[in-house]
Amino acid sequence: MTSKYARFLYQICKPTGEDGKLVTACKAHAELCRTAAGEGMVLLKNSNGVLPLKQGEKIALFGNSTIDYVKCGGGSGIVHSPYIRTVLDGFKIKEQEGKVSIFKPLSEYYANELKKVGREFMPHQDYALVDEIDIPDDLFRAAADFAETAVITVGRLSEEGTDHTVTKGDFLLSEKEEALIDRLCRSFKKVVVVLDMGIMIDSSWFVEREEISAVLLAWLAGMEGGLAIADILCGDVNPSGKLVDTLAKSFDDYPTTAGFNESEDYVDYTEDIYVGYRYFETIPEAYNRVNYPFGYGLSYTDFSFEGIHCADDGKFVTACVTVTNTGSVAGKEVVQVYCGAPQGLLGKPAKVLAAFKKTDLLKPGEAQTLALRIPISSLASYDDLGKIQKAAYVLEKGEYRFYIGSSVRDVIEARYRLVLEDNVITEQLETRCAPIALKKRMLSDGSFEELPLGENKTYNPQNPASTAKAPEEEFMFDKVGETVTLDEFIAQLTDEELVELQEGHDSTGIGDTGSIGGIKRLGVPYVTVSDGPAGLRTSRECGILPTAWPCETLIGCTWNTDIAERIGKAGALEVIENNLGVWLAPGMNIHRSPFCGRNFEYYSEDPLISGKMAAAEVKGIQSQGVAPSIKHFACNNKETNRSYSDSRVSERALREIYLKGFEICVKEAKPWLIMTSYNQINGEHTTAKYELLTGILRNEWGYEGATVSDWDTKAPHVKELLAGNDIKMPKGEKDSLRAALESGEICRADLENSAKRILELILNLAQV
Ligand code: GAL
C-alpha cells in the first residue's frame, strides 16, 4: 500500500494537474500571471490620452530594464523561473500583431551593450542592476527620426536585509537616468515612462514635467510582466490597478521619514495610527503634500457612480452603488467605501477604508450594482489609555459619515449617516504589548501627546499536562485519526523527540530553506518548507523552475481578492507537485515607510487591504492542502539591523494598524502557520513576546495554528517556546531545551503543546 506521506518520504513524481500533467510554470499559470500583472499595474499619468498607443505607432524603447527586466525582488522574493518575458518581448509580440513598430537598431544596441557588461537575459534575478548605458548621438537621432514616442523603462531592485535610501539610483533617479530622460523630453513628442520596481520611488520628476506624457507603475510583475506592460500600453488591457499607498510630493512628507534612520536600535512610531493616507487626509498641513492619493489609478474609460444608498441593520452598514462604464472601451472599476468617524475623545483619521469591491469587466454603457457590507464593529477605535474605557474597542458617540468613490479623494459622501447617541464598547480586552520607551504620539490635529511608560511583564505560562495515555502497542503517525488520537500519538513520543520537533532540519527536497517535522521511528515525515511570496523558490541547481508571480504590492493594487485566491491556489499546486508542504507566503506587513526594503513583499499601507488580500491568498493555498505562512508577525517595517531593531509603538497603533491585517486574516482564513518576525516590539523580540503570541494571537483571536520563527532569530529558544513560538528555524537550541526541561524551567506539557500544533499542521497537508 502506498504510504500516506509518500510525497514527503520518497519525493515521488506525481503531477498535480488535470489529466496527470505537470502544473509547475504551466501555460495556465503563465496566463494567470499575465492577467494578474495587467490588473495590478497602476497608470499614474496619461496626458492628452497618449495611451493607449495608436495602431501602428512607431516607438523607440529606452532604458536598460527594457531588456534587463526586473521581474522580482531578492531574498525570499527570488524565484528562479524558466524564463522572463521582458518589455522588449512584449512589444515584439505587439509588433507581430501590427500594433506597433519598434526602432530595432536601438533595441539591438541595448542588447549588445548589456551583454558586454554581463547583463544579457538571465532568468535568475539575484544580481544588481547597472546604471543606464550611454546611447551614441547618431543612434539617438535616428531613433528620434523614426519614432514619435519614446518608452523608457526604469528599473530598481529591492531585497530583504537592506532599506532604500534617498540617493541617486535608488529613491531618486541616477544622473544617467536623469540625463537620458532630459534628452528624451527634448527629442520626442511623447515620452512614456514604465516604472519596473517594487518601491514607491520619488514621483515629483514626472508629475512636474509636462513632456512626460504617461507613467505606468508596473511594480515587480513576475515572469510575464513584460507582456502585461505591452498589453496595457497598446490598449489590449485596460488598466484597473489602484494605488494601495500614498505617493507623497517628497519623501520628507511622510511622517515616518524623520525618525526612520534616527537609530539602528529602535524606531519610534510617533505618527501612531496616522500612517499613509490616514496621515495625509487628516493632518491639515499634509493634505497638499500628495502627488497621487491612496486608491488612485487611471483607466482608458470613464465610470459614473450613481444610486448611492446606505442603510444599516444595527450590525452592518450596507453601501450600494451602481457603476456605469460611460466611456468607449471595456474596463473594471474599484468601488472604495471610506468611513469618517467622529473625532470624539480618541481622535480619528478623517477617512478609513471600510470596504472595497472590484467590478466585473464592464462593456461601454454597461452597469453593475454592488453592495458592500461593513461590520459596524470594525469602525471602532482602541482606547489604550482609558480616555473612555481602557483596553476596549469603542464606537464613540456621534455621526459616522460614509464616502464612496474610486480613490480616497475622489468620493461622494452618502446622505446616510450612522448616528450613535452613546459610546458603545464593542470589545473589552486587556492591555497587551504596551510601549515601554515610546514617549509621545501624534494626535489627529498633528500635535503630540505624551505616553505613560510601562514595563514588560514576566509570564510563567502553565501549559496543561495532557491526560492522554500512549496505547500499549507502538503505532505510526499515519494511524492518527484512524485508530488513535493525536494526543495518544504524542504520548508515545520521547522527550528527545519532542525537543527535536521544536526546531528546523535540513531540506529533504528541492526547497532551499529547510524542513519541519521528522520523527523517522514513527513515520512523521520531514516536510520541506519553501520561500516565498512571489512563487516557489527552489534551489537553482535542482532544475525545477516554477512560476514567478507578481509581487504582493502588485496583487494588492488589483483590489481583486479573487485574483489573490487564484494565485494562492495555483502557487500551492506547484508547491505540492514538488513535494513541499509549506509555502512561506504571503508577506503582509504594513508599508509604514517607503524606505522599507521589503515593501514589495507586502501588500499595502492599509490593514484592510492587507488582511483581505492575505486571507484570500491563504484560502487559495490551503484549499490545495498546502500550509501558507503569513509573515512577519509583526512590525517588521525596517530591514537595517532587523534582528534587533525595536519597533516602539503604542498599543492602539499596534492593534489598529500593524496587527489588524493579521487579525483579519487569522479570523477569516484560519492560516495553519504564522511566521514571527526578526525585530522586537516594545523591548522584546516578537518570537519571545508572550503577550503577542499567546495573549493576543491565541487567547484573543482564537488562533489554533502553529507559529514558526523567522530564520536565525536572536531570542533564546526556551523563551521563544514559552512565549508560544512553536518552531525555531533553521535550527533550534536543543541543548538549552534539554537543560530547561531538566531544571524545570519548561515542562513536558510545554513541548507537547507545540508538538501538537506542528503535527496538526502536517496532518492537514495534502497527501498523494
Ligand atoms: C528570511 C526571511 C523570511 C523567510 C526566511 C527563509 O531571511 O526573512 O521571510 O522566508 O528567510 O528563507
Image (cartoon, rainbow, N blue to C red):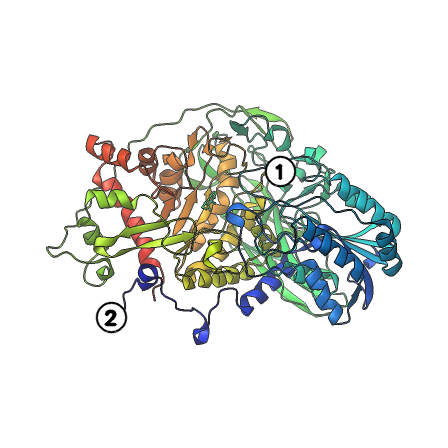
Residue closer to the observer: 728 or 353: 728
x and y percentages locating residue 132 in the rendered image: 73, 46
SS of the residue under disc 2: loop
At x 36%, y 35%, the residue is 690
Mark 2 is surrounded, within 10 Å at the Cα level, by few (under 14), some (14 to 19) or many (20 or more) other residues, namely few
Of the numbered discs in the image, which one, if any, rests on residue 1?
A: 2
Give the crowd class for mark 1: few <14, some 14-19, many >=20 residues within 10 Å.
Answer: many
Residue 442 versus residue 531 in the image, above or below: above
Please tell me whether mark 1 sits on a helix, a strand or a loop.
Answer: loop
Q: Are marks 2 and 1 in contact (CB under 8 Å)?
A: no
Q: CA distance from mark 2 to mark 1?
A: 55 Å
Q: Quadrant of residue 527?
A: bottom left
Q: Closest to the observer: 82 or 396?
A: 82
For residue 679, above or below residue 153: above
Residue at 44%, 60% in the rendered image:
575
List x then y, in percent, for residue 358. 61, 60
Provide residue 571's location: percent of width, then percent of height: 49, 60
Q: Is residue 462 above or below residue 98?
A: above
Residue 255, quarter of picture: top right
- The quarter of the displayed image where residue 405 is located: bottom right
Q: Amino acid at mark 1?
A: His
Residue beneath label 1, please? 164
